[in-house]
Every structure is written in structure tokens, then in C-alpha cells.
Image (cartoon, rainbow, N blue to C red):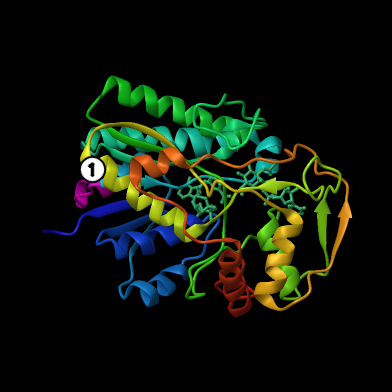
Amino acid sequence: MTTQTILVTGGAGFIGSHTCVALAEAGYEPLILDNLGNSDRRVIGRLERIIGKAPRLIVGDVRDRALLDRVFRETPISGVIHFAGLKAVGDSVADPITYYDNNVNGSFVLAAAMHAAGVQTLIFSSSATVYGDPDRSPIPETAALRPANPYGHSKRMVEQALADLQHAHPAWRIALLRYFNPVGAHESGLIGEHPQGKPNNLMPFVSQVAVGLRERLAVHGGDYPTPDGTGVRDYVHVMDLAEGHVAALRHAEKQPGLTTLNLGTGHGASVLEVVKAFERASGQPIAYDVGPRRPGDVPAYWGDPTLAEATLGWRARRGLDQMCADSWRWQQGNPNGYE
Ligand code: NAD
Ligand code: UD1
């Protein structure tokens, strides 16, 4: 059998790079298209060390229709995993047009190029952020969609457009994957997440405190109606997520249709539970202060992953201790990312 090439937009980024590993392990050939706006081309050498072969990187933008047409013309591509996009909630509030252009227009240009090329298998990175502040947890896929910021709106808009596309053209095979909170790193410590500037997200901040890059964690709120008063989230190991994409691709190959799935663990962990787990994994104390709530934060939510398990046979296998141990290995070995 010939190896199938999967176009991975945003494949140089955090989740995309880990998914390239899972794709290669499953026998696919990842072809990365990334504008390197939030990533580093040196990830390719790291991927080569893990996979044994450097994936091809095309440096370019998903909004560049001529480039996409050329890529689809020159390489037989059997499916696309679409990670490319911007993901900082605060930036999306400050600069919504840039967010809609990258995330919504970028997805439209990609879908139109795929349609023209006859490539009809698409896995899309959505987010649990489409649920906004949910009525209850665990959140099922049928919960109301109430995104609370332009980033969340951009994901919801693309979900709707892809559902309409699949309805109009039933031969398409589309999976909309709603990730909860992706954390961790590949167990090799060779690839991981390296946010530019001060991290917004909890796990990168905690690991930077552990490695001595930052002094103290500010815990955003200690008076939530949760067991220890701090915010609760569904942290999911990035390699579990990566394997979820391969499972979704395999499922899409079996039959046309549209599938919308949560990818999470089904369990919530509080900020202080994450801090304790990271202290255990790293052997380092994490200094913290409990401060005011962060505006816009939801007290607690976690996903219901039972539909993903029933549909894909996929389940998150790695727990919080492994998420912290793998984040720590990456952080310790690469305090300045890929530099
Ligand atoms: P990331 O920033 O590490 O990866 C995104 C990649 O896309 C980067 O390498 C960036 O350079 C590239 N990119 C951005 N805009 C592009 C464009 N117009 N053309 C080509 N390349 C472009 O982010 P990530 O955490 O790996 O997220 C991947 C996807 O998953 C995003 O769509 C994000 O919205 C979604 N998602 C992420 C999270 C999370 O917490 N990390 C949660 C839910 C959903
Ligand atoms: C954020 C995004 C969400 C995105 C998700 C991806 C916002 C409002 N939401 O969600 O759209 O899908 O990241 O992972 O930005 N915390 C601290 N101190 C910190 C950082 C975070 O106490 O320095 C707390 C937060 O209050 C929250 C938890 O840690 O309770 C997790 O925060 P974070 O990692 O930013 O994720 P989300 O808020 O879930």
C-alpha cells in the first residue's frame, strides 16, 4: 500500500507537531503547511529525531489560495488536518478582524481549495470554548453553543460553515474536534509548547515557575464554588489529543459524514491540584499567591468524552501526573523553546 499524505496546516505548532508524530507512527506521511507566525522551523529537526524522517515543511499561509492550489496539484493528498489559526482569547477581543481573517477566512480558503482539488476529508481543530459558560459538566456535544469572545465565535462560525458544506456535498468526511485544555509534551522531551512572552495558560506558567524563569504563579481566584475555591478544567495530554486526530481520520476514511466530538478526559482538576501534581513531577516547589479572579473566566467545566470513545474507540489514557512529568521534561531541557 502506498503511504497516504496528510496535509497538516499549523503542523509546526504545539498540537500540530505532536499530531505529526502520531500520524507518522500510524503510517501516514505528514506534510506541514505553516506560516511560522507562532512556531519555529527548528521543530522539524526535532520531529526527525522522533520519527526518523524529517516531515516536509511548506512555509506559507492558509489564506494563500494560489499556494494551496499548487500544493494540491503537486502532491496527492488524501486528507487535511486543519490546526492553523490564532488562539489567544485576549488578542481576539482587541483585534477581532485579524482573528476572523486567520481563523474563519483561512478555513474558507482551505475548504474551497480542497473542494476544487477533490480532497474531501477534513479534521478541524475546534475548541471547548464554543460552549462558553456551560449549564453543567460534564459537557455533552449537544450542549448549547454560547462562545463569549471573538476567538470562540470564529470556531463556532467555522463549525457551522463546515456542517453546511458537508450537507451540500454529502461525500465530504468532516470531523469537528472540540479540545478541552491541551497540556503536556511528547515523552521524549524534544517537542512541546513554548508560548511567546508571558504565558496566559496555567501549565506553561507553572512550568516556567518550576524552572526558575518566573518567580510566582498568580492563582486567578480562590473563591469559586469548587472544592478548593480555584478554577477547574479538563486538562488533556497533547499526545492523547494527537492520537485522537488519527482515530478521527481513520473514522472519516470509513464513511462520509460530519462528526462533532469532545476530546477531553471527562475529569476536572483545580489550579491547586495542578500545582501539587507539578511539584510532585518536578521536585520543585511552586510559589504562588491567590489573587483576584481573571475577568471572563468560567469557574469550572469538563467534557463528556463518551461519544468520542463510542465513535472512535479513543480515550485519553494519560493522567495529570504524566502531563506534568512530560511538561517538566520539555521545559527543563528547553527553557528557551527551540532556541
Ligand atoms: P499553535 O499556535 O502552537 O499552532 C498553530 C500553528 O498555526 C502555528 O504554528 C502558527 O504559526 C500557524 N498558523 C497560524 N495562522 C496561520 C495561517 N494563517 N497560515 C498558516 N499557518 C498559520 O496553537 P495550538 O495550541 O497548536 O493550536 C492549534 C489549533 O488548535 C488552533 O486552531 C487552536 O485554535 C486550536 N485549539 C487550541 C487549544 C489550546 O489550548 N492549545 C485549545 C482548543 C483549540
Ligand atoms: C483558556 C482560554 C480558552 C482556551 C484554553 C486553552 C480564556 C478566557 N480562555 O482557557 O479559550 O480554549 O485556554 O487551553 O483565556 N490560571 C491561573 N493562573 C494563571 C493562568 C491560569 O490561576 O496564570 C487558572 C485560570 O483561572 C483557570 C485555569 O488556571 O482556572 C486554566 O487557565 P488557562 O490555562 O488559561 O485555560 P482556560 O481558562 O480554561
Q: Residues within 10 Å of mark 1 (few under 14, many from 20)?
A: some
**Residue 261: image x %, image y %?**
44, 38
Please name whichever residue, 338 or 258, is drawn nearer the observer in this view of the structure: 258
- Asked where in the image residue 112 lies, by quadrant, the reply is top left
Residue at position x 13%, y 59% in the image: 2
Residue 283 included in the magenta stretch of the image: no
Please name whichever residue, 14 or 186, is drawn nearer the observer in this view of the structure: 186
Where 31 sits versus 68, above or below?
Answer: below
- Asked where in the image residue 329 lies, by quadrant, the reply is bottom right
Residue 75 included in the magenta stretch of the image: yes
Residue at position x 47%, y 75% in the image: 188
Residue at the spot of label 1? 253
Residue at position x 34%, y 44% in the image: 312
| Label tally | 1
Is residue 11 in view? no
Q: Quadrant of the C terminus?
A: bottom right
Is residue 226 in view? yes
Please name whichever residue, 225 or 242, is drawn nearer the observer in this view of the structure: 225
Magenta-tinted stretch: 70-78
Please name whichever residue, 98 or 226, is drawn nearer the observer in this view of the structure: 226
**Residue 206: image x %, image y %?**
72, 64
Q: Quadrant of the N terminus?
A: bottom left
Callout 1: helix, strand or loop? helix
Residue at position x 88%, y 46% in the image: 292
Amino acid carrying label 1: it is: Glu
